[in-house]
Image (cartoon, rainbow, N blue to C red):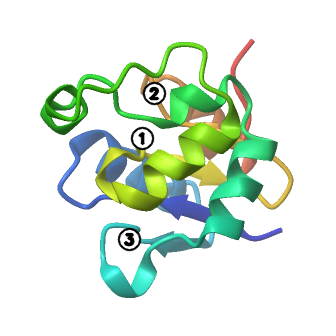
Amino acid sequence: MTLTLMHNPHCSTSAHALDALTEAGHDVTVRKYLLVAERLSEAELRSLAARLQGDPVDALIRRDKKYRDLGLDADGLDADAVVAILLEHPSLLQRPILDDGVNVVIGRPRERQRAWAATGRAVVEA
């Protein structure tokens, strides 16, 4: 199984997630999605949204200044609308996100990351 972490190295929560996974011995492909060369395509965003455990709107950083400046109100948006926003504004992608090839989970709160490290899967603690 391949683990892919959507990672922002400038985010302490994202760095914590990467550390937890690697310290547990998991091989992780790191995707620095803010770099132009590593941006997620529309197809990749749609795949993530379809497999995300939770509401697609959770994939947006709604507390971000850019979100407010754009006047966005994502409550109730469907996956297509979320994908459209993220294609135009990739910096609004929540982080960290773990993709195990089957499931996709957002690593907030940080407690979720313990389950990732223990299982090597994109899971939400019960």
| Residue 5 in the image: above or below residue 32 | above
List x then y, in percent, for residue 78. 68, 29
Label at residue 32: 3
Label at residue 94: 1
The residue tagged with tag 1: helix, strand or loop? loop
At 43% across and 80% down in the image, what residue appears?
A: 38
N-terminal label among 3 and 1 = 3
At 70% across and 25% down in the image, what residue appears?
A: 124
At 47% across and 60% down in the image, what residue appears?
A: 87
List x then y, in percent, for residue 53. 74, 30
**Residue annotated with mark 2:** 108
Residue type, numbered disc 2: Arg
Residue type, numbered disc 3: Lys
Residue type, numbered disc 1: Gln
List x then y, in percent, for residue 72. 33, 26
Q: Are marks 3 and 1 in contact (CB under 8 Å)?
A: no
Camera-side residue of 53 and 70 = 70
Q: Are marks 2 and 1 in contact (CB under 8 Å)?
A: yes
